[in-house]
Structures are given as structure tokens and as C-alpha cells.
Image (cartoon, helix red, strand yellow):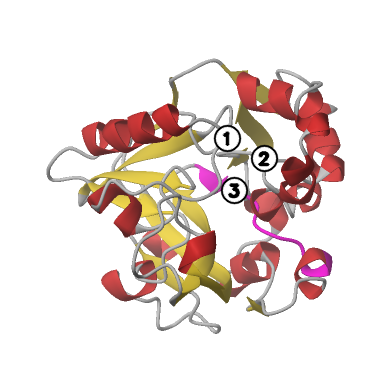
Amino acid sequence: MIDALRPAAAGTWTVLALQYASRTALRSNLFHQRDERSTESQTVAYYVWLAVSKTSTVLIDAGMSRSTAESMDGLDYHGSPIELLGELGLTPDHVDTCILTHLHYDHTGVVVDLPSARYVVQRRELEYWTGPWAARITREQWLHSQADTEHIRTADLGTRLDLVDGDLDLFPGLSVHAVGGHTAGMQVVRVHTDRGPVVLASDASHFYENIEDDSPFAILHALPDMYGAFDRIRELAADPGIFVPGHDPLVSSRFPAMTDAPGAHAVIIG
């Protein structure tokens, strides 16, 4: 199924958003700034993204494992990212690269299930989670899976682990860009598609509202850097580009669904 979506032109990619879960939360827990809507509820969607070129299959983030999902009250779990890839006719062996935008538990959950993928993470992000500071911050303990990070940290450097310092062109038409803000080493992904550049913001902007209203998310590492991330995403997605937030249910309604996928949890971004 996925082969039909692979573009023929070199340096051009097709990007899919795969929604693996959703839940409802109070806006007071989702936005840094309180306002008259803070007591309202809002749906939070959980995605991983798949970028395919003529020759490469790249998974952006690794979602949440089924065991973690089953321990979370109120989470509607559609299936693990591995299962959603299976709906597209892909096995874990097909994924040659897994870009990790950051190392929160809902973005690293199936790294152990990718037997041949090369992990791409910002050096600063890995050093933060394996260094002394994160261990002393109570909030960080529930945001982070030590087991996932240890699996990534102990991958063979240069063979299965690429530590990036800043911006890097990984493939023709696909690059990563360090932005910080949400986490110490948060990165976003820019992909060239037939529709123009697509910026996968992940948690640098959880919702369209974050960037469009200049309203930061509640969980952050550095507030000035989060504002800077908004500006960088706008720059990278300059007209006619598209930016895709990390947890907005509107993503599933703004882009066409893959109706032939069994679970109908995939939309085509570009």
C-alpha cells in the first residue's frame, strides 16, 4: 500500500500523520497562560509521522507503547505505531531511520521494536535526560522513560545512533532543525513534498493555536526558546509551506484520510 505513495522524483517525500491515541484534558493543563477558557476541556491527539521517498522510510517519533497506554486512565488507544505501520503494509524492518524530536515517553515508546532503524536525536536532548538535572526535577520523571532513553543511548554511535548538533540535512529534501523550548534539545523536521515544504513541529507546537495565537504550551523547558521555536517554524514553513502541530486533532480533519487503510488512522499531509 505504501509503495503507491512513494514519489518518483528524487528529493521529494510523501508525509503521513498516524494518530495512535487521543484523550481529553482541561485547557488549564495544556496552555501556559490562563484565560477565560482555562476551565474548558480540549481533545489531545497523539501522532507519529511517516515520511517516505523513492528509497527511504523514515518514522518521526516512536509514540507510546501499549503497556504504557494501558496504564493511563482516559486514553483512547487506537493501536501502537507498529500496528499502524502494519496497516500500511510496513513492518518494523522497513523503517531505516527514526527521528526523535525529543525524548518524552509518548515519543519514544516503540524504539525497542525498530530492529534496524538509525536513531536521530539532538545531542543536547540526550545529554539532558542522561545528565544530573532531569533526575532532580520531579515533573521530568513522569515525562520520560529511562528504559527507552537507555536503549537509544547504548545504540552504536555512528551506526545506529546519530547525535546532531543543531540543523542537519539528513537526506535530500529532509532536514532536522534544533529549536528547544518544550525540551532542552527539541528539534523539528522539514520535508520537501509535492505541496511544498512541510514542517513537522511535533511538540514545539502542540496545537495550531500555540503558534497562531502565540500561546505557549504548559509544559516547557525554557519559555523564551518556545517563542523562538514558533518563529523558527514559521520561517521554515514559509509560504507556501505547511506546519503540522504535534497533538492537534484538527490535523485529522485538515488533511485527506487514507480511506483504504484498515484502521483509517492515517492522513496524507503532503
135, above or below 269, in the image: above
Residue 257 x/y as whole percent: 37, 76
Please tell me which of labels 1 and 2 falls first in the chain. 2
Report, in whole angstroms, how far the alpha carbon at label 1 lies from the one at label 2: 8 Å
Per the rendering, the mark at residue 61 is 3
Name the mark on residue 183: 1
- Judge the density around disc 3: few (<14), some (14-19), many (≥20) Cα neighbours within 10 Å: many
Where residue 122 appears, x then y in whole percent? 59, 25
1 vs 2, front mark: 1
Kindly report which numbered mark, 3 or 2, lies closer to the viewer in this rendering.
2
Measured Cα–Cα span from mark 3 to mark 2: 9 Å
Quadrant (top left, top right, bottom left, bottom right) of the C terminus:
bottom left
Q: Are marks 3 and 1 in contact (CB under 8 Å)?
A: no
Q: Is residue 53 visible?
A: no
Kindly identify which numbered label has been placed on residue 103.
Answer: 2
Marks 1 and 2: CB-CB under 8 Å? Answer: yes
- How many residues crowd around disc 1 within 10 Å: few (fewer than 14), some, or many (20 or more)? many
214 is higher (above) or lower (below) than 5: above
Relative to 255, does residue 198 appear above or below in the rendering?
A: above
| SS for dot 1 | loop
66 part of magenta stretch: yes
The answer, for residue 63, to whether it is visible in the render is: yes
* Number of residue marks: 3
* Nearest to N terminus: mark 3 or mark 1: 3
